[in-house]
Image: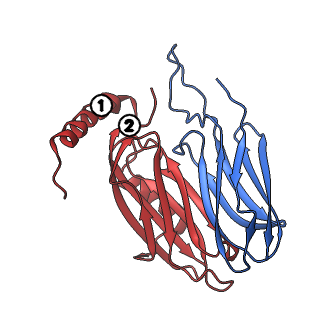
Chain colours: A red, B blue
């Protein structure tokens, strides 16, 4: 874990107190909610580590707009391509952020978008290959100002 | 407050066959997540764009299902391997049933 400068520590502290104020009004998801969503999609199938590059900021100052990029390693041919990618967040009111469906026409299974994050939390990404294999990865984003609106 | 949803897309005008190009899209939309409360304390009903699709000459290239955690004025970029000249069509589907669409032509040498 990186050490924080005084400025960052103060920002994180204020985010924590903000989260504490917001928390009673909002039912937030947890890691189990994310697992449940993934179970709905793929039952108990095991996902391997690797092949997904999830690019998220380590610290997001504004939870309303958090850019993220997903890049899954694949030849993207008609026989071997990335079918779908799902992205979840374990500390948002609703854990499911988005799903992508790729085709071999993409040439590269990469996409960028922007999400809202209510608080500091883990982003979980799961990729389904054309042969049915699953891969997953996880990355934490520290959010200084939550993006739920008020 | 509702704004008109205006899509904007950036597709290179030309590409070499086999080249993987990046396509960037943006649409103006509130993406009301259904969690917010108005001044009277009533929950503002959810209204988001829930689906984005990109086709090339009528064939599916890329699709995305969006949930309320997608930021306002959603941006989406993805890749495309240029094969032949033709036209992209992009469609955004709103919760209220409307569709917004945009097209872009590309010449492949």
Q: Residue furthest top?
A: B40
Q: Earlier in the sequence, mark 1 or mark 2?
A: 1
Residue B52 numbered mark, or none: none
**Crowd tier of the residue under label 2, counting other residues whose Cα lies within 10 Å: few below 14, some 14–19, many 20 or above:** many
Percent x, y of residue B104: 79, 57
Percent x, y of residue A121: 34, 50
Percent x, y of residue A61: 35, 41
Q: Residue at x 40, y 46 (%)?
A: A29
1 and 2 marks in contact (CB < 8 Å) = yes
The residue identified by callout 1 is A18
Q: Residue at x 72, y 57 (%)?
A: B53
* A140 vs B32: above or below: below
Q: Secondary structure at mark 1?
A: helix
**Crowd tier of the residue under label 1, counting other residues whose Cα lies within 10 Å: few below 14, some 14–19, many 20 or above:** some
Discs 1 and 2 lie in a common subunit: yes
For the residue pair B55 and B8, the one nearer the viewer reads as B8
Quadrant (top left, top right, bottom left, bottom right) of the C terminus of chain B: bottom right
The residue identified by callout 2 is A146
In the image, taking residue A136 as reference, residue B44 lies left or right, namely right
Q: Chain of mark 2?
A: A
Q: Secondary structure at mark 2?
A: loop
* A59 vs B106: above or below: above
- Could one spot residue A37 in this view of the protein? no
Q: Residue at x 64, y 76 (%)?
A: A107
């Amino acid at each position: 874990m990186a050490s924080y400068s005084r400025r960052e520590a103060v920002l994180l502290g204020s985010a924590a107190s903000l989260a504490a104020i917001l928390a009673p009004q909002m039912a937030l998801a947890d890691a189990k909610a994310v697992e449940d969503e993934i179970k709905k999609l793929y039952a108990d199938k095991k996902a391997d580590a690797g092949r997904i590059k999830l690019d998220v900021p380590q610290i997001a100052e504004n939870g309303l707009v958090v850019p993220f990029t997903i890049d899954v390693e694949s030849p993207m041919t008609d026989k071997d391509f990335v079918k779908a990618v799902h992205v979840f967040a374990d500390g948002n009111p609703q854990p499911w952020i988005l799903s992508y469906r790729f085709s071999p026409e993409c040439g590269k299974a990469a996409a960028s978008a922007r999400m809202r994050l209510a608080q500091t939390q883990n982003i979980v990404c799961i990729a389904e290959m054309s042969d049915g294999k699953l891969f997953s990865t996880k990355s934490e984003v520290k959010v200084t100002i939550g993006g739920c609106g008020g | 407050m509702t704004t008109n949803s205006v899509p904007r897309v950036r597709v290179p005008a030309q590409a070499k066959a086999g080249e993987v190009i990046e396509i960037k899209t943006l649409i103006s939309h509130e993406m009301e997540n259904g969690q917010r409360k108005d001044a009277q304390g009533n929950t503002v009903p959810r209204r988001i764009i829930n689906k984005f699709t990109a086709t090339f000459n009528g064939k599916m290239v890329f699709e995305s299902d969006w949930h309320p955690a997608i930021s306002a004025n959603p941006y989406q970029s993805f890749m495309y391997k240029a094969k032949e000249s033709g036209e992209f069509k992009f469609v955004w589907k709103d919760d209220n049933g409307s569709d917004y669409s945009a097209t872009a032509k590309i010449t492949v040498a």
